[in-house]
Image (cartoon, helix red, strand yellow):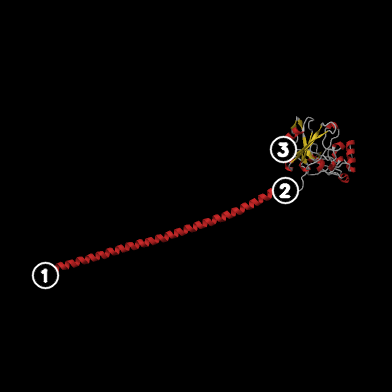
């Protein structure tokens, strides 16, 4: 045996499976029933007298269905639908009524279109008010909690102090972390869930309802994760391709620019050579013209001298 010690004060844990003896225990360590209700529930539990699948009215997807309790007797289906639809799209709703009088029995089952919407209502609707009554919500333990025994057979969870039949382990009344030694062997023999020593929760933490393996929510999450990775890869590929194309464009632009610059240089050099040749030609012509004119001047002077000599 071992005890929890002072480090577990104000710590709690929740039942993941139902056992009538444990449900009647404030810390989940009882090994014998302490009231007639627990004994009746234990009898049904051991004999397998309760079959949750035998309830023909319990239709719908249990993973999308929410239990709503402590409703006012004046609350109608329309009022309940209006209040609960703000958390998601409601697929079906069943307000449980007395089979003879038709009066409301103060609880209902609300099925949402998706598990995600149910979980939102599970987290946000608890302790909200409908018709001036504070309600409680929980997941569909009737169909999802192994070993479940309903309140009418001495089981259930929660309850009020004045009833004298409190049941622990649920959302409203969790098990307190044990301060006394835990009878591990006795609990194992009875098939009772052992306290999660070292893994207790605080009262402010919300216990998560069971999730269906491979549920639509999981597939959606997986789809979006896969989609995101594919999109990231596609964006990376496009970015890489765009970068390569941009690099190629820049390279081509640089090549064309370089060709133009080289062409301009070649053209400039050719122009300079042509201009130089043109200037040389002009200078040559001027020299030749000067030489010719000088020669003509010299010939004219000789002719004039010869004429003067003949006259004499």
Q: Which of the 4 image quadrants contains residue 289?
A: bottom left
Q: Secondary structure at mark 3?
A: helix
Q: Examine the rendering and report whether any part of residue 243 can be seen.
A: yes
- Where residue 279 appears, as percent x and y from the top left, is 32, 61
Q: Are marks 3 and 2 in contact (CB under 8 Å)?
A: no
| Nearer to us in this view, 71 or 33 | 71
Instruction: List the residue tagged with mark 1.
Output: 310
Q: Secondary structure at mark 1?
A: helix
- Answer with mark 3 or mark 1, whichever residue precedes in sequence: 3
Q: Which of the 4 image quadrants contains residue 303?
A: bottom left
Left or right of 236, for residue 152: right
- Answer with mark 3 or mark 2, whichever residue precedes in sequence: 3
Q: Residues within 10 Å of mark 3 (few under 14, many from 20)?
A: some
Residue visible at 14% across and 69% down in the picture: 306
State how far apart marks 2 and 1 are (Cα). Answer: 134 Å
- Where residue 138 appears, as percent x and y from the top left, is 78, 38
* Numbered mark located on residue 87 in the image: 3
- Where residue 223 appears, as percent x and y from the top left, is 69, 49
Instruction: Indicate the quadrant containing the N terminus: top left, top right, bottom left or bottom right.
Output: top right
| Nearer to us in this view, 99 or 132 | 99
| Nearer to us in this view, 19 or 182 | 19
Left or right of 220, for residue 271: left
The single residue placed furthest to the left in the displayed view is 312
- Where residue 218 appears, as percent x and y from the top left, is 73, 47
Q: Residues within 10 Å of mark 1 (few under 14, many from 20)?
A: few
Instruction: List the residue tagged with mark 2.
Output: 219
Q: Nearer the viewer, mark 3 or mark 1?
A: 3
Q: Secondary structure at mark 2?
A: helix
């Amino acid at each position: 045996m071992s005890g929890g010690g002072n480090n577990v004060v104000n710590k709690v844990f929740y039942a993941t499976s139902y056992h009538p003896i444990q449900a009647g225990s404030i810390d989940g360590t009882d090994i014998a029933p302490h009231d007639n209700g627990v004994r009746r529930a234990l009898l049904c539990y051991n004999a397998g007298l309760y079959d949750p699948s035998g309830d023909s009215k319990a239709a719908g997807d249990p993973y999308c269905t929410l239990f709503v309790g402590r409703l006012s007797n004046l609350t109608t289906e329309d009022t309940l639908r209006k209040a609960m639809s703000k958390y998601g799209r409601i697929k079906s709703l069943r307000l449980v009524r007395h089979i003879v009088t038709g009066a409301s029995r103060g609880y209902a089952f609300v099925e949402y279109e998706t598990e995600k919407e149910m979980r939102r209502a599970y987290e946000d609707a608890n302790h909200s008010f409908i018709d001036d009554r504070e309600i409680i919500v929980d997941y569909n333990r009737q169909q999802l909690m192994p070993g479940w025994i309903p309140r009418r057979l001495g089981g259930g969870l929660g309850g009020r102090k004045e009833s004298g039949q409190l049941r622990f382990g649920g959302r409203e009344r969790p098990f307190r972390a044990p301060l006394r030694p835990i009878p591990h062997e006795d609990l194992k023999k009875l098939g009772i869930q052992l306290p999660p020593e070292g893994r207790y929760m605080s009262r402010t933490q919300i216990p998560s309802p069971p999730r269906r393996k491979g549920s639509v929510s999981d597939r959606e999450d997986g789809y979006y994760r896969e989609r995101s990775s594919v999109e990231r890869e596609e964006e990376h590929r496009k970015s890489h391709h765009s970068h390569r194309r941009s690099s190629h464009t820049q390279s081509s632009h640089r090549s064309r620019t370089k060709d133009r610059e080289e062409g301009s240089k070649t053209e400039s050099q050719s122009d300079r050579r042509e201009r130089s040749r043109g200037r040389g030609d002009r200078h040559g012509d001027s020299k030749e013209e000067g030489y010719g004119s000088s020669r003509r001047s010299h010939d004219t002077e000789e002719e004039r001298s010869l004429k003067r000599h003949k006259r004499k």
